[in-house]
Image: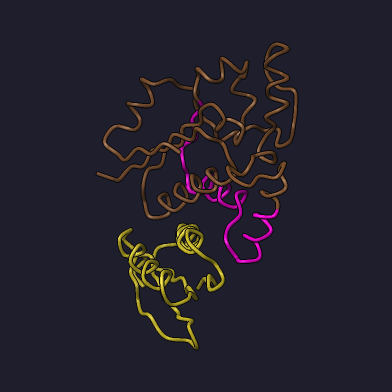
Amino acid sequence: MSKKLSLVVFHGNFDTAVAAFTLASGAAAVGYEVNLFFTFWGLNIIKKKQGRAFVGKGFLAKVFNFLMGGRKNLPLSRLNFLGVSPKLMTHLMKKRHVATLEELIQASIDLGVNFYACEMSMHILGMDKDVFIAPVKEVLGVAKFLEYSEGGEVLFI
Amino acid sequence: MRRLDITRDTCPMTFVKTKLELEKLKPGEVLEVYLSEGEPLDNVPKTARAQGYEVLDISHVEGGTYLVRIRKRGGGG
């Protein structure tokens, strides 16, 4: 039977997103089936709108989504300095020939990693599936998560 | 013959790029991978073999650079 790795991508920080997609693309490249479950802050990584945008249903949800922003606004979990650090970090990554977050996400998509979004946190934030990039193939809850991750390794990031 | 240079890449892109190139091979076709000693040299041939590809040979190019030739099975050649 093939090996399987499932990640719960919860935190949605720049650095944790890099870690998640490094593991995801690396595992997929060596033949693992890989599932990424995006929930809460992690949903910001997979929004179509990469900057700040009023998405979602209802006034509060729109404001919340605007403040959180998208992939270009992911904060560094330490030493964020109002969002300057993730840009500096990307600069350093390029300089040191380490894959950037964008490259890791594209590699994960190319390698067939499965992207899923959490129904409950989407409900809170008034989001529909069409808020997310195309590779997000299904919206699901705990029961489906357990089903899809069964028999493999599970990590919470 | 396809050629891939991952001498300047780091984990995980070394074997991510290799995997994406290997997927493009036709049966019998060979991929030449230029890589650095250390992690890439340890892992790229190993993961290629584990996924059913044939590692034809590993040769030293210069300095810390090596050439690994990987063949997709089948195709009679």
- What residue span does the magenta drawing correspond to? A88-117
- Above or below — where is A81 with respect to A62? below
- Above or below — where is A153 with respect to B1? above
- Above or below — where is A119 with respect to A154? above
Whether the magenta-drawn stretch holds residue B14 is answered as no
The count of marks equals 0
- The residue lying toward the viewer, choosing from A10 and B53, is A10
Could you tell me which quadrant the N terminus of chain A lies in? top left
**Residue A108 left/right relative to A146:** right
Q: Which chain is brown?
A: A
- The residue lying at 54 percent from left, 67 percent from top is B9
**Residue B46 left/right relative to A22:** left
- The residue lying toward the viewer, choosing from B54 and A62, is A62
**Residue A25 left/right relative to A101:** left
Q: Which chain is yellow?
A: B
- The residue lying at 47 percent from left, 63 percent from top is B18
- Above or below — where is A68 with respect to A18? above
Residue A152 at what x, y percent from top left? 30, 39
Residue B10 at what x, y percent from top left? 51, 65
